[in-house]
Amino acid sequence: MKQITFYIVVATSVGCIAWSLRSHPIDSLMAKAEAVGPYTPARPAVEDPLPVAGPKKITSPELAPDAFDQIQPLLKAGRNGDRDAQLQIAKIMRSCPNYYRKDQSRMSLDETISSYQATGIGAEEIRHNFERCSRIWASADLGTSGEWLAMATKAKQAQAMALTAEDLLWKAHSEVLFRNAPPGSNPEPVVTDPALDTTLDPRKLLLEAAHSNNPDVYNVISHLSLLLFAGNPDAHALYYSWMLVACQRGLDCGKNSDLAASLCSHSAGACDNFKDPTDYPLWLATNSKVDLSLVETRAAEIIAKLDAGEYDELGLGS
């Protein structure tokens, strides 16, 4: 799904937002209108395959309690090298957006509400973020989400590796856009957490993570498809194909899931008839006018390669 303390600075006078990622990162590509979201990274514009727009509704029970309290039971295990605890700490911290000015000082609640009026993020959501995350922001001894994620990645935690790969790919893409920005557009530079190891190869990380049969990894690959498979005419279909694989392999994709929360809250009746986890990605593909037969064919090919251990044939390393 904010923070690794990865920051990408939006090209507006609003200032800087922490590179915050929800535990269900697929939402980061939901729509251009959500380029700056409460739990999603402020990322560069990519041709988004999903038609859903509007501010997100906070529905996840995981995000409801105070984030500081969520982390406490995990700290001992994380500090003792438990890679799964390290990942969970990173994800909780990443779920907290950090509202910064350009000089990296934090904005007040009222200033944040005023600054984000034009983005579609309501005052209620911002207040919720402040209530849930203020103790995390004020804690000086917790480390950063980037540091926790780096530890889990080094320990070969599959989802952590995929999230690190995601951050590296978006950082590289953002910097290309920054360097190629047209005159007069005045974009802000990308700022990253020092814990991000930029010597790592994101594609190699994803390829290794894919060996885990972890549906969260396939979910990350899904919403990176427009970058991973750039130039491939099936890139949009692969977006939904990898999502379909993730749902088939155990990702919670039901109508009450966090993944479907934004769709179900903003598209009246869209989720009423969902009975199978695959209904969600197939509904999205249908409404994006993507050939369902192609989506299902590519998903079947992906699953066949995964089951056969033909990871090098997935196209992640090319």
Image: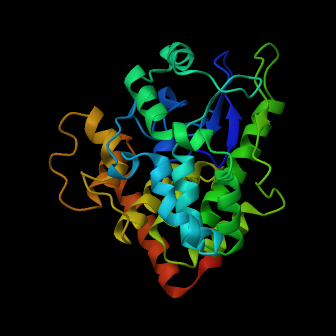
Please provide percent x and percent y for residue 280.
30, 53
Count of all numbered marks drawn on residues in the image? 0
Q: How is the image coloured?
A: rainbow
Please provide percent x and percent y for residue 132.
45, 39
Q: Residue at left 50%, top 40%?
A: 133
Q: Quadrant of the C terminus?
A: bottom right
The image quarter containing residue 41 is top right
The image quarter containing residue 174 is top right
Q: Is residue 155 left or right of residue 247?
A: right
Q: Is residue 149 left or right of residue 180?
A: left
Above or below, 165 relative to 267 = below
Q: Is residue 42 visible?
A: yes
Please provide percent x and percent y for residue 7.
69, 38
Q: Residue at left 63%, top 18%?
A: 14
Q: Residue at left 43%, top 45%?
A: 66
Q: Is residue 221 visible?
A: no
Spot the residue most to the left: 273
Above or below, 187 relative to 244 = above
The image quarter containing residue 155 is bottom right
Please provide percent x and percent y for residue 307.
47, 84
Q: Is residue 10 left or right of residue 276?
A: right
